[in-house]
Image (cartoon, helix red, strand yellow):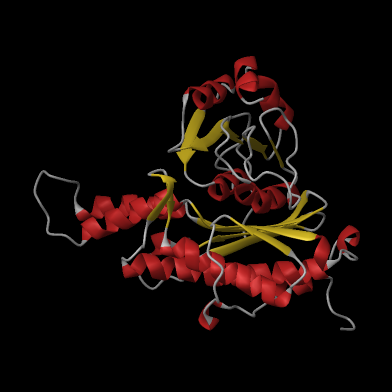
Amino acid sequence: MSGAPPVVMRLVASAYSVSEKAGAIVRKVLHSGELGIVEKTGANDLQTLADRLAQQSICASLSKHFPKITIIGEEDLTSEEVREDLIDSGQAEEIFQKTCPAEFTDVKEEELVVWVDPLDGTKEYTEASKLLHLCTQPQVPLKRPDTAQLHTAALWLLDNVTVLIGIAHRGRAIAGVINQPFYNHQLGAGAVLGRTLWGVLGLGAFGFELKEVPGDRRIVTTTRSHSNKVVVACVDAMEPHEVVRVGGAGNKIIQLIEGKASAYVFASPGCKKWDTCGPEAILQAVGGKLTDIHGNSYCYDADVKHMNSAGVLATLRNHEYYTSRVPPSVLQALM
């Protein structure tokens, strides 16, 4: 249609809107107490009803309005008709107030690949659910922390949970959306939960206040649940002043752009393209960088392998310092 915004901006606007619907689904499933958990490859690789419904919502909604794009989601779901109430037709109008970067104005729909992680931080999500369930049980003296402690721990875990949508063109992550479904929980009952961060290369990133770790302080964020000797050796080699262990790739990138960490270091093949595409685009939109442990960029073409087999190293500044600190033994382990 004449005068319509470029497809990249329309797709980002739709991804923003459906990410908020997915975030609402994630909250609703948690509050129901019926998570519908299944193990995909083991106890550390779980899938919940929220994962399944959120992915159905995102993929079906984007496919309906952009039938020529390629969408790759984390969850291997059976092909079935998606419920109408899961379909989102909204578009975030604030995105149309921005000017599309010149290099993306003529991009065609069929040239775009969308990577979707419907619930990044599933382990933290399920752990939080268990703690919240305990909060409802009769208190047993000396057997467990009090209800207030359990509730605080559960809310911290929910901070780790995000919905991730990344948009790639010619193998490069060019735009991304991160929804944090439980953001603002600390404000208590009545608070509006959730926020959405988004960014486009050449345009910038929005929905948060960009901050950096002050001075020369090195704070490394890394995995809280998938560590091993190689991961520890790589983190230690950075000579950090502090190590922050949190869940979710999306959450770790938020740590970087909000000044809570200076590097995200994960020397392991556990991360996938749907974990990093959207967050990488937002990070790069504010001048940051995400590579593998060797300093090489990842490719997000539709036919690439899903595993980020050489780990992840992301920074807002001074990327070269961190890549230079990776020990030879770690580089060898992740060849």
Quarter of the figure with residue 191: bottom left
User: Where is 231 relative to 132, above or below?
Assistant: above
Is residue 99 among what the camera can see? no
The structure residue drawn at horizontal position 62% and vertical position 17%, both measured from the top left corner, is 327
Q: Quadrant of the C terminus?
A: top right
Q: Nearer the viewer, residue 114 or 163?
A: 114
Q: Quadrant of the N terminus?
A: bottom right
Q: In the shown orientation, is residue 268 left or right of residue 121?
A: right
Residue 109, x across and y down, in percent: 81, 67
The structure residue drawn at horizontal position 21% and vertical position 55%, both measured from the top left corner, is 147
Residue 308, x across and y down, in percent: 64, 39
Residue 113, x across and y down, in percent: 74, 58
Is residue 225 among what the camera can see? yes
Q: In the shown orientation, is residue 328 left or right of residue 244?
A: right
Q: In the shown orientation, is residue 11 left or right of residue 230?
A: right
Quarter of the figure with residue 44: top left
Q: Nearer the viewer, residue 335 or 330?
A: 335
* The furthest residue to the left: 141
The structure residue drawn at horizontal position 60% and vertical position 46%, both measured from the top left corner, is 253
The structure residue drawn at horizontal position 20% and vertical position 62%, both measured from the top left corner, is 136
Q: Nearer the viewer, residue 140 or 301?
A: 301
Residue 143, x across and y down, in percent: 12, 44
